[in-house]
Image (tube, coloured by chain):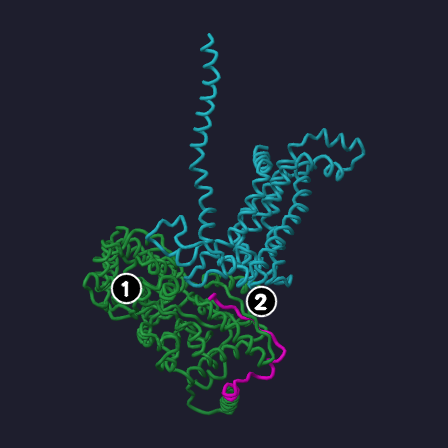
Chain colours: A cyan, B green
Amino acid sequence: MAVVAQRAPWSRRAKEIRRHTLIYVGLTPYLVIAVFPILWMLITALKQEPDLYRMDVVPFWFHLPPTLKNFEFLFQRTFYGDWLVNTLSISLFVSAITLLTAVPAGYALARLRLPFAENLGIAIFMTYLVPSIILFIPLSRVVSELGLQDTWWSLVVVYPTFTIPFCTWLLMGFFKTVPFEIEEAAMIDGCGQFGALLRVVLPVSWPGVITSVIFSFTLSMQDFLYSLAFVSISEQKPVPLGVATELIRGDVYFWGSLMAGALLVGVPVAIVYNLFLDKFITGITGAVIK
Amino acid sequence: MSDSRLVQADRPTVTRRSFLKVTGAGATGGALLAMLDARQAPAQLKGTSLRVILWSHFVPAYDAWIDDFAKKWGEQNGATVRIDHIPHLELPARYAAEFAAGAGHDLIYFAGQILTGQYYRHLVDLSDLANDLGTRYGPWMPSAKSAAQVAGVWYAVPDYFISIPVLWRKDLFESVGRPAPKTWDDLRVAARLLRPKGHPTGMQFSHCNDANHNWRALLYCFGAKETDASGQSIELDSKETREALRFAKALYDEGMTPEVFSWDDASDNRYLASGVASWIHDAISAFRTTEDTNPKVFKETYVLPEAAGPGGTWNVGEPNVWAIWKFSKNVPAAKEFILAVANSQKEAMGASRGYNMPFLRRRYDKPMPGLGQDAKLGTLQEQDKITAFFGHPGPMTPAAQEVLTTFIVPDMFTRVARGASIDETMKWGVGEIRRIYAKHKAT
């Protein structure tokens, strides 16, 4: 009996180890696929130019001493600093505009029992599906009339056209999950409709709000077509446009600086994104299943 | 209609109106020439601003030169000039937005994708400028007109074109006992011998600019034509085209590796700079990249203006032209700026390290800046004699432009290289081209 009693925990531990091993072995290919582009960016950003063109050696490591020249080029010979500020400003403004618009819109469609609210919600979401390649031509007229051509403010006006529809639809799903009873209880306690939204509905819909912010922020950061169409002045460009238009010349690519530029923007966003990962997953799945 | 076009008109009698117009044009032209001689723009430019859009030149030094040139020109004339640079492939989207908005840059630039035929109704007639430049430095290469004229009117002014020669490795050719290449057959034999030794060749079987240029060069060298000289009748379905397709299939089978199906415009640059390629067909950007990154390979890299084929020697260039929107807020300054750049062509060509090939014949006086002093690139000083552009021998019409941008010609070569029959490929390719031309005729 004693032997059996001693074996049992070991057997459980072995099972546990085997289970974890299998999980990590299964995850490893996905991890490699996910991390490889970042690793490649990092190595390329730190490589000397001649090292990039050597095909007789394994390309995944350094064969000449690493260099920071590509980063220096980025900050000293381009407007990368301006592009970073522009990108951040655009993303913050767009996220704010999106929240200010999508929260009341989603709330009204989900909870005010408006006629045709469901169909209206679907119609709003459908506008998100219209590709930007079709929209940029009529929007250029709007941007011109507003006198915003060739400033990053034009993008603050344009990006909400695709962030608001999606976020409204997303928040609609969330607001529907909030029981009417707690909102009514808040109203009995003296809250108006707006107060109930602010004090009760929004706090319990926090994952949806976070998801909307992340979505607006990242979509604003990664757009290329609208910024290409509306901004041509170097110091007014956001990062995606700046690196693609100033670091690619004809058929010559400044690979090191391109990768350095992508890395400096991509890694912080990935870290922030991971900090809110649980909320983001709850946000997406919560909205989808309602 | 511009005054200069009236000057050119063939009129049997002289009426009072025509006399006034002719003398008016003469006076305007004379004033323009006087200003050009003095390198001074009209007084009305003072206090104005000029916005220019250009492609991001592959030679950063050229962009620095033109930016500096614009600044100095602006200071001399009391005008503010700003130049924006974006990659050539992104220019059409920008123009579509500017056209829709009815606002944007005063002076625009078609690089590679020539949209003169598409937008000419909204572009300023530049015949006076073009004719003046033709008189001063010309004549224009005949193919220049097809990039800039619509129905005989200059709606654009050619600036320069990019040549796409053969860049080959002398040491590798010698290692298999091959002399300097002269023909496409020479290149094929060398590729066949060098691929087993780890030095294949490569031309893009994909959707990129180089694919359009390279396979068209082969087509034209085999005597194939895209259209007739008027640009109206499609002539691609020919024995010569079939021969070119057959040759390309053999070249791929014997001398390339499958990676060429995924190549972009920069892939052949890397192929040469890495020391792998035995030869490539590319702009001298690849030559310069190799010079900067792999001096050993660069030392052995030589330039052939173009390989000869059974139908002659035709190099397919990438044209670049200036144009001015009718909604431009500063047409006079835009025209003056074009003139100023054209007058400084030699400095511009030097700044581009020999990349900017002129459209005007007298600019080919040797030694040409950036080329004449270079033992290898010196061979490119007669490139005007062998250069054709897409649509050859027809003009760069909107239909020809659409055929170019939809990559039908490279797709035909790709299909054959992948094993499709030549008959099926011809049927598909010519069918697609006919559909495009019919659509443009209908509009």
Chain for disc number 1? B
Number of numbered discs visible in the structure rendering: 2
Q: Amino acid at mark 1?
A: Arg
Residue B25 in the image: state x and y as whole percent.
50, 87
Residue A253 in the image: state x and y as whole percent.
43, 59
Residue B342 in the image: state x and y as whole percent.
46, 79
**Quarter that holds the C terminus of chain B:** bottom left
**In this picture, residue A213 sits left or right of residue A256:** right
**Is residue B17 visible to us here?**
no
Crowding at dot 2, Cα within 10 Å, few <14 / some 14-19 / many 20+, comes out as many
Callout 1 secondary element: strand
**Lower sequence index among marks 1 and 2:** 2
Looking at the image, the residue that sits furthest to the right is: A190
Is residue B48 in the magenta section? yes
Q: Amino acid at mark 2?
A: Ala
Callout 2 secondary element: loop
Say the numbered circle drawn on residue B169: 1
Compared with B348, B240 (above or below) is above
Spatial CA distance of label 1 from label 2 is 49 Å
Q: Are marks 1 and 2 on the same chain?
A: yes
Range covered by the magenta-colored residues: B33-56
- Nearer the observer, A275 or B132: A275
Is residue B286 in the magenta section? no
Say the numbered circle drawn on residue B103: 2
